[in-house]
Image: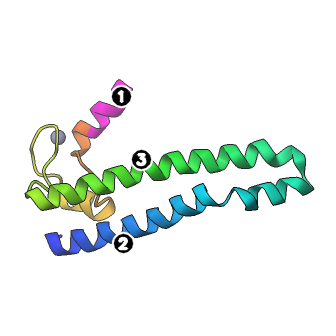
Amino acid sequence: MDDTTARERLESMLAELDRSIGVLRGDPVAVRDRSAADAGSDLTDTDRAQAMLTVATAQRGAVVAALKRLDDGSYGECVDCGKQVPEGRLEARPEAARCVQCQSRRERRR
Ligand SMILES: [Zn+2]
């Protein structure tokens, strides 16, 4: 995948995430309206929105970081070991910062 394609995909991901984050942040009214009819679901809806917001915010950070790596020319290199991240991995996740080995090492540590 060349840099231009990567940038286009990352920028459209970023736009998509910004939209989702905007909806999740700015739409408590919809949540409240629904829970007025069913007060019991209030916490669940809020929790779910909060969880989605956390995931979307984290992914947005990864996308922004990937765009920065495109700018400084290090895109496609693993941020931990500096080896080339396999093409197939970048196709699946253009925001990936690490090769599979470093990513799984990192996840094990958590
Ligand atoms: Zn690595």
Separation of marks 3 and 1 at Cα, in angstroms: 19 Å
Q: Quadrant of ligand 1?
A: top left
Q: Residue at x 30, y 32 (%)?
A: 106
Separation of marks 2 and 3 at Cα, in angstroms: 16 Å
Which residue is under mark 2?
12
Q: Nearer the viewer, residue 36 or 41?
A: 36
Which residue is under mark 1?
108
| Mark 2 closeness class: few <14, some 14–19, many ≥20 residues within 10 Å | few
Q: Is residue 106 magenta?
A: yes
Residue 5 is situated, as x and y percent measured from the top left of the image, at 22, 74
Q: Residue at x 22, y 45 (%)?
A: 98
| Element type where label 1 sits in the image | helix
Q: In the image, which residues are magenta?
A: 103-110
Q: Earlier in the sequence, mark 1 or mark 2?
A: 2
Q: What's the residue type where badge 1 is placed?
A: Arg
**Quadrant of image for the C terminus:** top left
Q: Residue at x 32, y 58 (%)?
A: 93
Residue 33 is situated, as x and y percent measured from the top left of the image, at 82, 60
